[in-house]
Amino acid sequence: MAGAAVLSGALPSGWLLAGPACYGAAMKPFPNDTGPFGAYAPGALVASIISRTRRASQNWAGRRGAFALRKVALRLLAGRPVDTEALGARMRLYPYNNVCEKRILFTPQYFDEPERALLATAIKPGFVFIDIGANVGGYSLFVAATAGHDARILAIEPQPEIFERLVYNIRQNAFASVKALDCAVSDKDGEITLFLPTHNRGETSMRIVNSDAGGQRLKVAGRTLLGLVQDEGYSHIDAIKLDVEGAEDLILETFYRTAPRSLWPKLVLMEYSNGRWALDLPRIMRTNGYRETLRTKSNVAWVLD
């Protein structure tokens, strides 16, 4: 992107629009740029802030300090993306209208640490992992970095803008184990309407779950989970992660009703959306032989006994 190259060359090393006017203005994120990795390496000041926020402790004071520093860095960045390494992978992150990217860039130690630790314990040779609602690849790339070259990882993301970022991030790494698909996962095949909030693309859903999403809709292709698994030729699934903002019940009820038991994942990690589910998903999981093994503020994990 020509505009990005001009901006990068015009700024002194270590400074990214740090003038007073920057602090009072609303920053518009740059559009996706698929140019060479490293073009958006942070300047010295922003890099120093990122280093400090990544070392912040898990306690209240550590988190408050990290979030305060993050605000300063975002103003300095002035809408630019950042090329970085996090969770064992290289990524280009746009930390503005996507909470996931903001967390991975500044505080990856806060990015679902108990969930990732549990997932890491399940990894074995030939690991098969499906990431539904992959966003920009945080989970998929973490698994790829941990599981090795013989893993099979399917990263599914329906939003075109976020999918483009996901594909870019996958391509910046030597992993040959990650495949990206641009579709929604649903209880049936066909066209699906997504509701997109403007403040956080990570809350996109097949259901209206935020008033901010009411005016923004996007039609995408929808597939059932079983159909995708059959297309990929999987004989088993070791783990699956779902972050679909309240549609987990639709996806999983259909899957367990139609899929052979040999394809049931050994570990299911999902966003805990109990107030949004139309079906009693915990009962469905227990009935099918799953045991809850982890509950955090945002997520729940189930293991097949």
Image: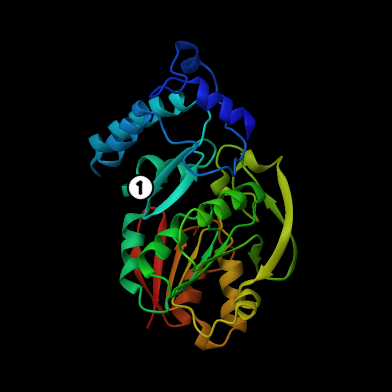
Rendering coords of residue 119 (x, y %): 36, 67
Where residue 107 sits, quadrant-wise, is top left
Instruction: Tally the marks.
Output: 1
Rendering coords of residue 304 (x, y %): 40, 80
Closest to the observer, 7 or 29: 7
Quadrant the N terminus occupies:
top right
Q: Is residue 170 left or right of residue 258?
A: left
Rendering coords of residue 15 (x, y %): 41, 22
* Residue reaching furthest to the top: 20
Decide: few, some or many residues near mark 1? Use Cα within 10 Å; few <14, some 14-19, many ≥20.
some
Residue plotted at (64% across, 46% down): 161
Residue plotted at (53% across, 56% down): 171
- Colour setting: rainbow
Q: Is residue 181 visible?
A: yes
Would you place residue 170 above or below residue 105 in this image? below
Which residue in the structure is indicated by mark 1? Answer: 108
Closest to the observer, 132 or 3: 3
Would you place residue 181 above or below residue 210 in this image? below
Residue plotted at (49% across, 53% down): 172
Quadrant the C terminus occupies:
bottom left
